[in-house]
Image: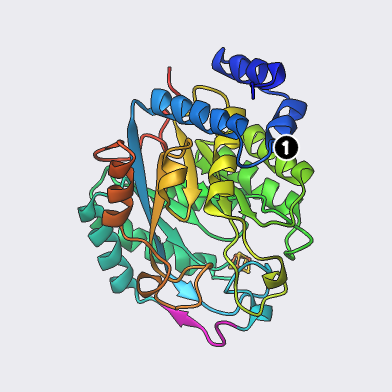
Amino acid sequence: MRFSPLIKDILNKALDGAILTRQEILHMLGIRLPSLEAGLVMASADFFTREACGGRAEVHAQVGLNCSPCPNNCLFCSFAASNQVFQREEEMAVEEAVLRAQKVEAEGANAIFLMATGDYPFGKFIETAREVRVRLQPDTVMVANTGDFGLKEGKRLKEAGFTGIYHAIRMGEGKDTKISPETRKKTIEAAKESGLFIGTCVEPVGPEHSLDEIAEKILITREIQPCYSGAARRITIPHSPLEKYGMISEYRMAFLVAVVRLAMGRELIGNCTHEPNLLGAASGANLFWAEAGANPRDTEAETSRGRGWNVKSCIRLFREADYEMRKGPSVIYSKNHRKT
Ligand code: SF4
């Protein structure tokens, strides 16, 4: 068994700092798993990430502010009204959100995400964010994970003290969700114009997604010019219409993390995966999320009692992968998100 000249050419091209074409990305996505070539892709991505971030990983912690039946009905989400997981609205008190944020800050999270469902009132989100902001250290990085918005709202997020947002054009967007890819793109443009950094990811990937769609979404994340990309699998929501497709393995997810890493160019510091796993950390991921409160992949309203990882366990996984941990505010969500 020998490596094909084509995969060697693609990886050498990426190592030389060149940007890979759609065909080259598609070729990598088509590699059989498990195989020597898949291992070579994963090892190359691991090398890229460690080199770009100086061997330092980050943990970001998300506080989910509410769980309620959301009319946007993204089929992969436990908040989707049509999935009937959460039948009534529940909201975290502002003081509780502050305490959760302070807790993860003290535990060493490099950035704190506030997340709300797509239909959560924007004004309320800003009010909570302001209160959290003043009760955190001034240099703690805050990131908004909320529904779509325009330029006015983007500026308000910036004024409220957010450094960036998390936003993605999801797998099956517009088909498995009631949100069009254009709406997502407009939000990202508004955020950029407001001076916010964009974190994104190729997600949520299921076994039914074609290589063409995965390649398309990888290219979209690259065009966004985010502060990080990555890959995450779909977690099955019981009785949802997508349950019949099942889930991809952590191994396949780690392979996708590696392909995304190589497609994003050599200088980008951050590459994420979710949920946290050791294979991902050895295949090019240097960013995990801890979660508290509501979580769109969980059927438990308080995810720290369900699927959610805490900061300490994320750090432990990275240490098992021989990463050092970045201390203090996130570098990924900063103007230094590319290695210079
Ligand atoms: S992913 Fe967001 S917009 Fe879609 S159903 Fe869930 S909360 Fe609503």
In this image, 266 relative to 58: left or right?
A: right
Q: Which residues are magenta?
A: 85-91
Q: Give the image location of residue 20, x and y in percent.
A: 67, 23
Q: Give the image location of residue 286, x and y in percent.
A: 41, 39
Q: Give the residue type at disc 1.
A: Gly
Q: Which residue in the protein does label 1 denote?
A: 30
Q: Is residue 87 above or below residue 240?
A: below
> Is residue 89 in the magenta section?
yes
Residue 162 in view in this figure: no
Q: Quadrant of residue 208?
A: bottom right
The quarter of the picture where the C terminus appears is: top left
Residue at horizontal 24%, vertical 60%?
102
User: Residue furthest toward the left?
Assistant: 106
Q: Is residue 5 above or below residue 24?
A: above
Residue at horizontal 20%, vertical 54%?
106
Q: Give the image location of residue 282, x and y in percent.
A: 43, 38
| Viewer-proximal residue among 125 and 275 | 275
